[in-house]
Image: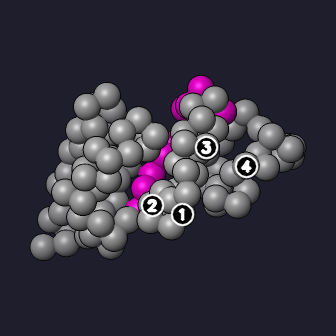
Amino acid sequence: KMAPLIVTLGSLFIRKSFNSQSHPSDQRILFFADLDGTLVGGGFERYFREYWTAEEASRKSILCYNTARCIKDYHRLKDRLASDLLNPDILITGEGTEIRWCVDRARALFELDQVWDQKMR
């Protein structure tokens, strides 16, 4: 089994035309993105949600947000954007000082990575 392909924002939307023996288009990806000014703003979050739901969710691709926001600010943003902002599999907050794993996508519940938290202390 191949390791996930790590994809940048610019290349994500040309994935359908990306055809290579080493990275077939049905391969799952690990997608990292900032929120403010990248995935959030100008209505882009809705377009991204539609793309991810239609193209990447069925491949079991991994969605990771890396934001300078603290966890409380992330939840406020999520509340404001409601269903337009997908809950990620991994949420990195506070400039990388906290890593959380999604344990309940429907309720936006995240569990703090205890190993990482101990390293940061």
- Label of residue 35 in the image: 2
> Which residue is tagged 3?
47
Q: Mark 1 highlights which residue?
A: 38
**CB of mark 3 within 8 Å of CB of mark 1?**
no
* CA separation in Å, label 2 and label 1: 5 Å
Marks 3 and 4, the one that precedes in the sequence:
4
Q: Which residue is mark 4?
A: 13
Residue 22 appears in the rendering: no
**Quarter of image, res 7:** bottom right
Q: Position of residue 65 (x, y in %)?
A: 43, 56
Residue under the image location 41 percent in, 62 percent down: 66
SS type, badge 3:
helix
Q: Position of residue 118 (x, y in %)?
A: 15, 65
Q: Position of residue 74 (x, y in %)?
A: 29, 55
Does the magenta-highlighted stretch encompass residue 63?
yes
Mark 3 packing: few (<14 Cα in 10 Å), some, or many (20+)?
A: few
Q: Amino acid at mark 4?
A: Phe
- Looking at marks 2 and 4 on the same chain, the residue that comes earlier in the sequence is marked by 4
Q: How far separated are the C-alphas under marks 3 and 1? A: 12 Å
Earlier residue among tags 3 and 1: 1
Give the magenta-colored segment's residue range.
55-66
**Mark sitting earlier along the chain (3/2):** 2
Q: Are marks 3 and 2 in contact (CB under 8 Å)?
A: no
- 10 Å neighbourhood of mark 4: few (<14), some, or many (≥20)? some
Do the residues under discs 4 and 1 have CB atoms within 8 angstroms?
A: no
Q: Is residue 26 left or right of residue 64?
A: right
